[in-house]
Image (spheres, rainbow, N blue to C red):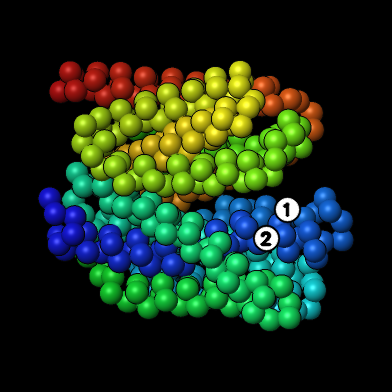
Amino acid sequence: MNIFSTPGFRNVWILSLSNALAASIMTLMILVGSLVGAELAPSAKWATLPIALTVIGTAVSILPATRCMQLMGRKHALWAFMALGIFACWLASSALGQQSFSLFCIAAVLLGSTNAALQQTRFAAMESVDPESGPTAASLMMCGGILAAIIGPELAVAGAHLTAVDYQGSYWLAAATVILGAILLAFYIPTVVPLAQQTAHASPTLNIIRNPTFILAVTSGAVAFVVMSFVMTGTPISMHHIYGHSLEDTKWVIQSHIAAMFLPSLVAPLLFKQLGIRGMMSVGLLCYCATVAIGYYDISVNGFWIQLVLLGVGWNFLFVSGTALLPRSYKQQDRFKGQAINDLTVFSFQALAALSAGWALGLINWQQILLICLLPILILAALLLIEGRINRRDKHSR
C-alpha cells in the first residue's frame, strides 16, 4: 500500500492539510481565548468562558453538521461551515474593536460550530480508502493536528499587534488560513456511494447503539477526551498555583502534552498493523493507568511532565482506535447517524469534563482527581473485555 500515490490516499492528504489549515482557528482560540476573556470579561472568573463556549458550541453543533453533510454532501457542507468560521473570525475581531465580551462569546460558539464540521473530515478520509486502511487514514488525519497546533499559536503571535487593538489581527490571519483550507478542499473528490446504499433506509437508532462494537468505539473516544480534558485542564492550576512550580515549567509541560497528543500519529499506522485496533486501545489504557499512578506519587516538574506526555499518547491511541473501529460497527447507510451519535457523545463528555475540572479542584485535591479518572478507565477496560468475548463467541457459533 502506497499512502503517497494511491488515489484514495490522495483524498486523505488533501483533507488532512485542508483540515489542518482550517482547524488552526481552534488552537489559536485555545491560546488567545482566555487572554481576551481576561481583558473583556466583567469579572476575572469569566475569563475562561469563551473557551468553554467553544467546546459547548462543538457539542451542540454535531447533529446539525452531520445532517448538513448528509443532505449537501461532505464537500459542500464543509465549505458552508468554513464560511461560518470565516464569519466567526470577523465577528471576533469586531468584538475586540468594540470591546464587547458578549459579542466575543458569540464568536466563540460559532467557532465551535465550525469545529463540529471539521471533526467530520476524519470520517470522510476513512471513506476514501478501503476498510483495512481506515486506521492509517485516521492516523494521517491526526497528523494534521500537529500542523494546526503549530499554525494557530503562530498566527496568534504574528497578528497580536497588527492593529491598535491587541489580537484583532490574529483573527484576520485565522480567517485567511480558513480560506486557504477551503481552496485546498476544492481538490477533494468525495467518495461515490452506490445507489443501493443511498436509497437504503437507516437502521433504527436502538439497533445501532446496542451493537457492542459500536458501544466500545464510542466509549473509547469518550473516555479518551474525558480523562484528557479533566487532567489537562487542571494541570496548570495544580502545577503553578497549588504546588508552586514556575510558569515556564508549567508551559513546558502543557506544550509537551500537546505534542504527545499528535506525534504518535506518525507511527500509529505501523502500530495498528502490529497490534490491531483493540490492541492499540489496550496500550492507550495502559498509558492512562500510568498517568494516574505517576501523578499520584510524583508532583515534581518531571513527574508532571511524564504524566502529561503519557496522557497525550494515551489520548491519541484511544481516540484514533475508537475512530477506526466506528465504521466497522454499522452499515454504510447508517454512517451519518452513527457518526453523529459518536461525536455528540464524545464532545458532550469533553465539554462536561472541561467545565467540571476547575470546579473539582476547588473541592478535592490533585490525587483525588486522578483517582476519579480510574472510573472511566475501568469502564472502558471492562467493555473491551466484554466486546472481545462476544466477538469470539459469535465467531465460534458460525
Q: Residue at x 41, y 72 (%)?
A: 181
Q: Is residue 376 visible?
A: no
The single residue placed furthest to the bottom in the displayed view is: 163
Q: Position of residue 232 (x, y in %)?
A: 60, 39
The answer to which of 370 and 356 lies nearer the viewer is: 370
Residue at screen point 55% across, 76% down: 173
Q: Nearer the viewer, residue 363 or 80?
A: 363
Q: Residue at the spot x=30%, y=41% of the render? A: 268
Q: Quadrant of residue 367?
A: top right
Q: Residues within 10 Å of mark 2 (few under 14, many from 20)?
A: many
Q: Which mark is residue 33?
A: 2
Can I make out residue 46 in this image?
yes
Find out whether the residues at labels 2 and 1 contact each other: C-beta distance under 8 Å: yes
Q: x, y percentage for residue 336?
A: 38, 54
Task: Tell me: residue 43, above or below residue 222.
Answer: below
Kindly identify the amino acid type of the residue bearing the numbered disc 2: Gly
- Report the side of 217 relative to 309 (left or right): left
Q: Earlier in the sequence, mark 2 or mark 1?
A: 2
Res. 369 image quadrant: top right
Q: Position of residue 317 (x, y in %)?
A: 38, 37
Q: Please give the label number shown on residue 48.
A: 1
Say the numbered circle drawn on residue 308. none
Mark-to-mark CA distance, 2 and 1: 7 Å
Residue type beneath disc 1:
Thr
Left or right of 113 in this view: 273: left
The quadrant of the picture occupied by the C terminus is top left
Q: Identify the image quadrant of residue 74.
A: bottom left
Which element carries disc 1, helix, strand or loop? loop
Front position in the image: 104 or 326: 104
Q: From the viewer's perspective, tell me whether residue 64 is left or right of residue 363.
A: left
Kindly identify the residue that appears in the image at 37 percent across and 78 percent down: 183
